[in-house]
Amino acid sequence: MYQLQNLKAVNLLHASYTSGASATAAFDMNGFNEALITIKATTSDSTSNNFSSCVLSESNDNTTFANITASVGDTAWTIPSADTSSVQIFQFHIGDTGTRKRYIKLTLVPTTTQIVTATALLGRAGELPTTTTEQGVVSAVNV
């Protein structure tokens, strides 16, 4: 099996969010040791309309979350200016989750109305996901 077949896809967000609206989605890391979270945001009407917040938080019980310090936008890293002509893609990489809590939550707050899509790819599974359900997809084609 190729390592890229050893993944689970989790759809986190795909909607139009208005200025100041909080877009959040949590997912379960149980059985996986890594995650790649990809966020795609449509163009903005102004370069100053970047996200006012972009952060990951974690929880053991999926109810009480605490920010992951290294993921806090405009504190630990700089949220880039919005792009008025191209779609922007952001990524968070979560390494060895032996030190992470079980549930991870993404929170974004746009400053203008934008369509935001976010997906998590979970990797390094303890047991290989062999069914489409375990892989988080409706179809898996290996070529």
Image (cartoon, rainbow, N blue to C red):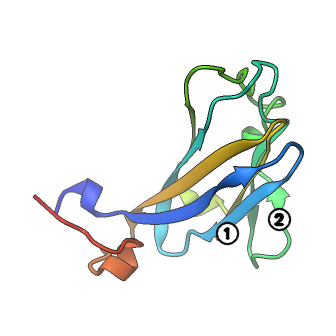
Asked whether the viewer can see residue 72, the reply is: yes
How many angstroms separate mark 2 from mark 1 (CA)?
Answer: 8 Å
- Disc 1 secondary structure class: strand
Quarter occupied by residue 78: top right
Counting from the top left corner in percent of width and height, residue 69 is at 79, 43
Quadrant of the image containing the C terminus:
bottom left
The residue that appears at 36% across and 63% down in the rendered structure is: 7
The residue that appears at 67% across and 69% down in the rendered structure is: 103
| Residue with the mark numbered 2 | 65
Q: Residues within 10 Å of mark 2 (few under 14, many from 20)?
A: some
| Residue with the mark numbered 1 | 103
> Vertically, is 28 above or below 88?
below
The residue that appears at 74% across and 28% down in the rendered structure is: 79
> Vertically, is 104 above or below 128?
above
Residue 104 or 142: which is nearer the viewer?
A: 142
Quarter occupied by residue 80: top right
Quadrant of the image containing the N terminus:
bottom left
Residues at badges 2 and 1 in contact (C-beta under 8 Å)? yes
| Type of the residue with mark 2 | Phe
Q: Residues within 10 Å of mark 1 (few under 14, many from 20)?
A: some
Counting from the top left corner in percent of width and height, residue 13 is at 63, 58
